[in-house]
């Protein structure tokens, strides 16, 4: 072989060997790398297993330690709660006894409503009293309203069933008598309308107002066919009449009562209707005390067919308690004649009280029916569900009456014609005698006379804050319900705070607001301000509410709410504050029906209640707040933020810690509120505890523990009541 070819073959052989060598080295390196990776993975796996084993051992030790002290912690918590509860019960008992003694020692002439003999004597004497002057009537009504408030308090105190029935019967009797007296005063004013006529209009318009009642009365003396309506400027009430009514002998009354004696009848009627439906038979509703007390001012629904016997009963009730004589009397004989007429009507008023008694018995029997869910008539969408809506600002009684014969003075004698029925309701639109004589008659498609609507305008009460545009409902006397039909052309002027609408007849009406308009809550915070001193802030869907708690009393704070001036700066018990806030349109409180109307974050009620108890115990030194992770931990757990807070200022953002709470175990979390993801990992250096109280104590300063130890039982009870009433852990 030539030298050149031998050299080429040699080079080729050397290249192959070189490649094989490189390949072997690469394989060896790969195997080495794989072995190193395997060793690293094995070491990491061993380390992970070791860490997990250590974590498990640590977890086991912590769980074992928690189990060992569980009974002691639970017993200690139970002892604290029992001691506080005993102290609160003792204090409440002493307060009741003191209140009874103070009531007994009161020497203002008012009867004790808890003493049946005294209150019955008061009712009888007041019923027989011949006084009809408006100012004296209003003073007597104010006293009667104080007695109804006392009866409400007594009924809420949990008396025996027979005693509760007695209280309720007395309450309904007083309510019925109050309205009857107001009707007597109205009649007396209208009898002398001509002597108080206005020079400019020729009609009589009268305004009477006290802290409980506003009365606007207009008498049509001029009968001007061009009359449109009248606005009582100072009182913010007005009405509009259709042209046919402008030429009739009528009087229009707008009676605004700041109390509500109708809504509780609606609630009872819904329960009774439910019982009738369950029984398989629906009977026509009978007259109840609400119909008795309102029969003199309600119009009739022209679209509703009323059974003849019910209609006759209604008319008879409307004339109850009235005088039955027509006479001419002198000024000197007026007083004795009035007494005689009231005596003649006494038997009919006793019939009223018998109706009240039977209504109480029906209510007592119906109170044991199913109350676990709202009872409404789903077939009638116009019936107002009083679990979903709250009447605010009292009741406006919008009535039209026949103008009674006017008194005349002839030769020193006052001549007054007394009608058998006393004050007579003008049943618009069913009474068409004067309406049909008008040329402005509107007929429906069947040729029947169709009623023209009446208008009414009302300025919103100054004592109520409407978070949304108010709604309006009318009272159905026969059905004993608030309804939203038979009304139209509703407009609301937000700047003037005036609501205007039209109705097919004259009805009592009220203003409504959705009960849970401010729910669900967006956030909340309970922050200590000192010893037995804290601030509870709830940011609702529409407004923020702040409640200051000091000892056993609370005080409301809301910015830019002039309607709540009567509440600002006033200390009151949590029960009284709750009633006052709901009455003023600020509802942050829940009940057994609330979850049916609000989108909630459901939690176990027992766990939730236990947490509220422990939060109250620690609230003098620990701040608590809402957490967004609470909605992601299921029904069996709760998550909230907490930290020790001994200063009065706001809590620093970095000071908050997250706590995971459950029925068996409570722990401090490693994760923070603003982290991107949630982890239930236990915070480093902390332990499990069976109670939230002991978990908070583990890192608390001595000053903080001293504050907690010195917390008064009445303060912790007040905090607990507010937390349980708002249920912020579920409704946020």
Image: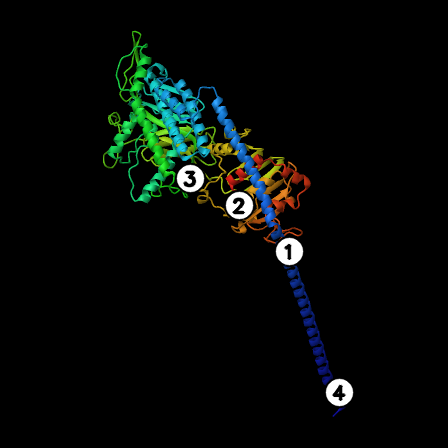
Residue of label 3: 387
Left or right: 400 in relation to 540: left
SS of the residue under disc 3? loop
Q: Earlier in the sequence, mark 3 or mark 2?
A: 3
Figure check: 195 above or below 492: above
Say if residue 481 shows up in the picture. Answer: no
Q: Percent x, y for residue 347?
A: 29, 23
* Tags 4 and 2 touching, CB below 8 Å: no
Q: Earlier in the sequence, mark 1 or mark 4?
A: 4
* Depth check, front residue: 674 or 678: 678
Image quadrant containing the N terminus:
bottom right
**CA distance for labels 4 and 3:** 107 Å
- Name the colour scheme: rainbow
Residue of label 4: 7
Left or right: 334 in relation to 591: left
* Tags 1 and 2 touching, CB below 8 Å: no
Residue of label 2: 608
Farthest left residue in view: 447
Residue at horizontal 32%, vertical 43%? 277
Figure check: 55 above or below 500: below
Residue at horizontal 39%, vertical 24%? 117
Observer-side mark, 3 or 1, equals: 1
Q: Earlier in the sequence, mark 4 or mark 3?
A: 4
* Residue 61 - label: 1
**CA distance for labels 1 and 2:** 28 Å
Q: Quadrant of residue 228?
A: top left
**CA distance for labels 3 and 1:** 51 Å
* Depth check, front residue: 167 or 722: 167
* Depth check, front residue: 286 or 560: 286
Observer-side mark, 4 or 2, equals: 2
SS of the residue under disc 1? helix
Q: Earlier in the sequence, mark 4 or mark 2?
A: 4
């Amino acid at each position: 072989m030539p030298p050149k070819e031998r050299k080429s073959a040699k080079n080729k052989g050397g290249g192959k060997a070189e490649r094989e060598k490189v390949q072997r080295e690469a394989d060896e390196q790969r195997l080495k790398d794989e072995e190193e990776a395997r060793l690293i993975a094995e070491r990491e796996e061993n380390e992970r297993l070791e860490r997990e084993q250590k974590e498990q051992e640590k977890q086991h030790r912590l769980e074992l330690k928690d189990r060992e002290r569980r009974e002691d912690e639970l017993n200690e918590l139970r002892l604290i709660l029992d001691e506080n509860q005993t102290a609160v019960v003792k204090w409440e008992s002493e307060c009741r006894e003191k209140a009874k003694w103070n009531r007994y020692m009161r020497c203002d002439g008012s009867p004790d409503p808890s003493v049946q003999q005294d209150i019955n004597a008061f009712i009888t004497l007041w019923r027989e009293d011949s006084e009809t002057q408006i100012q004296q009537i209003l003073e007597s009504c104010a006293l009667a309203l104080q007695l109804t408030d006392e009866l409400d308090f007594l009924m809420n105190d949990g008396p025996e069933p027979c005693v509760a029935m007695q209280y309720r019967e007395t309450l309904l009797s007083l309510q019925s008598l109050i309205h009857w007296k107001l009707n007597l005063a109205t009649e007396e004013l209208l009898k002398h309308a001509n002597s108080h006529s206005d020079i400019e209009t020729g009609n009589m318009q009268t305004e009477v107002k006290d802290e409980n009642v506003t009365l606007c009365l207009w008498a049509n003396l001029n009968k001007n066919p061009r009359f449109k309506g009248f606005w009582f400027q100072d009182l913010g009430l007005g009405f509009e009449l259709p042209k046919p009514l402008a030429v009739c002998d009528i009087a229009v009354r707008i009676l605004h009562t700041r109390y509500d004696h109708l809504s509780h009848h609606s609630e009872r009627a819904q329960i009774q209707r439910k019982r009738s439906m369950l029984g398989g038979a629906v009977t026509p509703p009978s007259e109840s005390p609400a119909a008795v007390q309102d029969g003199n001012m309600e119009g009739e629904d022209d679209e509703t067919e009323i059974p003849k016997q019910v209609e006759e009963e209604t008319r008879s009730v409307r004339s109850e308690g009235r005088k039955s004589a027509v006479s001419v009397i002198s000024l000197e004989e007026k007083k004795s004649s009035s007494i005689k007429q009231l005596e003649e009507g006494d038997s009919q008023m006793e019939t009223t009280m018998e109706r009240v008694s039977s209504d109480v018995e029906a209510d007592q029997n119906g109170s044991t029916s199913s109350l676990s869910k709202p009872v409404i008539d789903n077939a009638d969408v116009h019936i107002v569900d009083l679990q979903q809506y709250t009447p605010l600002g009292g009741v406006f009684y919008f009535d039209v009456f026949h103008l009674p014969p006017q008194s005349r003075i002839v030769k020193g004698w006052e001549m007054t014609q007394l009608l058998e029925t006393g004050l007579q309701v003008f049943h618009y639109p069913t009474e068409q005698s004067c309406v049909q004589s008008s040329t402005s008659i509107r007929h429906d498609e069947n040729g029947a006379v169709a009623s023209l609507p009446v208008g009414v305008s009302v300025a919103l009460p100054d004592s109520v804050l409407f978070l949304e545009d108010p709604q309006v409902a009318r009272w159905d006397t026969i059905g004993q319900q608030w309804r939203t039909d038979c009304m139209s052309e509703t407009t609301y002027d937000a700047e003037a705070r005036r609501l205007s609408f039209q109705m097919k007849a004259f009805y009592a009406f009220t203003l409504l607001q959705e009960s849970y308009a401010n729910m669900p809550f967006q956030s909340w915070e309970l922050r200590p301000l000192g010893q037995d001193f804290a601030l509870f802030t709830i940011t609702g869907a529409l407004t923020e509410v702040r409640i200051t708690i000091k000892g056993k009393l609370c005080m409301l704070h809301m910015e830019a709410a002039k309607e709540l001036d009567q509440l600002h700066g006033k200390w009151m018990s949590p029960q009284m504050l709750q009633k006052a806030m709901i009455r003023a349109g600020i509802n942050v409180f829940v009940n057994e029906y609330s979850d049916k109307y609000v989108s909630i974050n459901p939690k176990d009620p027992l766990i939730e209640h236990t947490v509220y108890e422990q939060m109250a115990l620690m609230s003098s030194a620990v701040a608590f707040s809402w957490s967004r992770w609470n909605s992601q931990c299921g029904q069996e757990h709760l998550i909230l933020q907490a930290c020790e807070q001994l200063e009065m200022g706001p809590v620093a953002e970095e000071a908050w810690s997250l706590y995971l709470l459950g029925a068996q175990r409570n722990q401090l979390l490693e994760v923070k509120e603003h982290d991107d993801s949630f982890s239930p990992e236990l915070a480093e250096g902390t332990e499990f505890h069976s109670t939230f109280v002991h978990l908070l104590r583990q890192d608390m300063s001595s000053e903080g523990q001293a504050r907690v130890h010195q917390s008064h039982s009445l303060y912790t009870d007040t905090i607990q009541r507010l937390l349980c009433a708002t249920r912020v852990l579920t409704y946020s």
